[in-house]
Image (cartoon, rainbow, N blue to C red):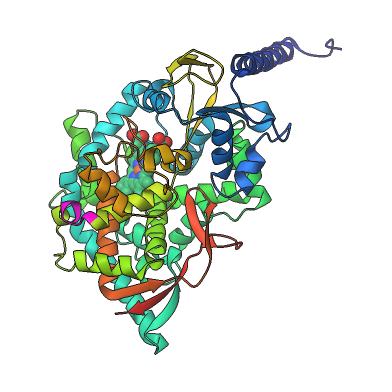
Amino acid sequence: MFQNLSKIEIICLGILVMCLLKHVIRFFQARLALKWIPGPQASSLIWGEEWQLYYSLPGSPYLKWHKEFGKVVRISGVFGHQILSITDPCAISFILGEATYNFPKPNGVREWFKATLGEGILWVKAKEAHEKQRRTLAPALSQQSVRNLTHIFYETSTKLASQWTKLVDHSHTGEIEIEVTNWVGRFALDTIGRAAFLYDFDCLSGEPHALAETLDGLTNNENKLSSFYMRALFWTFPSVLCIGQKGEMIRRSKKELGEIASKMWRDAKVAGDAEGRTLMALMIKADTASGHCMNEEEIVSQMRTTISAGYETVSAIIAWVLYELSQSPQLQADLREETSTSRESCFDELNNRYPLLDAVLKETLRLHPAILENHHEAASTMLVPLSEPLPGTSDTHLVIPKGTTIAIPLNVLHTDPAIWGPDANEFRPQRWIERKNAGIRDDRELLAFSKGPRSCIGKAFALAEIKALTVTLLRHFAFSCPHEIEPFQSFVIRPRVKGQGPSSLPLLVRKL
Ligand code: HEM
């Protein structure tokens, strides 16, 4: 059978068989090691639970499984790939904290970031390389830097408010229905463009905008079959990201963002950023001080990452804040009263003076975490501590075999009645004020920005930006929602009118 093959072909075939064998052995070892962990029967031999996870209400299968099986649940992914869904606090602290570099992002997720953004901080894996990138970005996104950018947040907020004023004025009734997700996406893009490199994408002019549409098309998927195949398969076969229409979109958005970042970098080198306040200027300064000096491609990857990270999540959270406000005229009135003395451009005021505003934002992040599942992968076989033994055992440690995917489902943690009380599923901002009065540290159980060395580095930026917009919009408008809204899974969790295609949040906007 092999007599017609050359020596080289036989060697290649041998290597291929060895690789396959290695995978099969690892697969069965993992299955064996995790066999005793409880979990649902795989509903499909090929797709495992991916089908259920994609087509159910976002996160709802996790709620069911954890209720039935406890804090560590074994589920199957595509072709029987083993996934552990973990809500045990001790294990989570270990995975996100001291062992974070033993639990990098899964290969498929890293390939997605590499394909869309380049080899920036969201892609980098090794401890030393990550720490170096983090040190370069940290000064640009520190509280002090964000303080200096706050005027930009107010300027873009005012621009959005004046566009909506024009729309309302056209209606002659003082009220109009506005699809807000598209507008807040444009707001987030203009804001991050100006903050990153004083570049105005000018999305808020309201005209069709190629970059805004490309970025939106990349991640704002309807529940299409093609999107399901891509989501289900990219864990195991990351190269699916390069094929078809989606692959084309990925390449286009990477190219477009790259061209803008390159141009900005070259312009900055010629003109200089007089006060050195943009994210790019501060990043280059920190990099030069470290003696490293990134090349153009490294800077461009970092800028693409910052823009994308600052666009997608922020716009989703703003949409959910507006949705929650639209459900309660009283809450809008209370917030208006609290922030009526607000002076524009004052970062410290936004940060410290408005407990209700702060509570509304935290409650939104709790019930609508943009990134619902925090995914990791065991880089080697690891012994993970547990706060309590698994059902039927007395061991407070868990052996996680190399290659196992870990999912941390935020919706389960954020609605756990043991932490949040019997009204855990209710939107009740006041709980944050009560928690503060009871001396409970704010962010202990809120994982929307993750925690540990790889937690969100743009948190201060995001909070100030969203608060500035909320204050500005409430000063001009009142909101109500005439539609039934549901969460749906695109790249992040976005709102949409129940049963409809991609993300949408039509709100009735009334001028005050
Ligand atoms: C409400 C808005 C935001 C949310 C909910 C959010 C959430 C997160 C989460 C959960 C992570 C950890 C991801 C992981 O472990 O895989 C993360 C990382 C990151 N975020 Fe954010 N983010 C937000 C806004 C921003 C903004 C505005 C920026 C930049 C201007 C930003 C930049 C980053 C970067 C660079 C990382 C990677 C950090 C690292 O790997 O060390 N984020 N974000």
- Residue 302 seen anywhere in this rendered image of the structure: no
Quarter of the image that includes the N terminus? top right
Question: How many numbered marks are there?
Answer: 0
**Residue found at the far front of this picture:** 422
Q: Position of residue 87 (x, y in %)?
A: 46, 31
**Residue found at the far right of this picture:** 1
Q: Residue at x 21, y 45 (%)?
A: 437
Q: Position of residue 343 (x, y in %)?
A: 13, 65
Q: Position of residue 476 (x, y in %)?
A: 28, 75
Residue 447 or 251: which is nearer the viewer? 447
Quarter of the image that includes the C terminus? bottom left
Q: Residue at x 42, y 20 (%)?
A: 102
What segment carries the magenta color?
Answer: 350-355
Q: Which secondary structure type mostly characterizes the magenta part of the structure? A: helix
Name the image quarter holding residue 413. top left
Name the image quarter holding residue 350. bottom left
Left or right for 164, reference 503: left
The correct choice, above or below, for 452 with respect to 219 in the image is above
Left or right for 268, reference 34: left
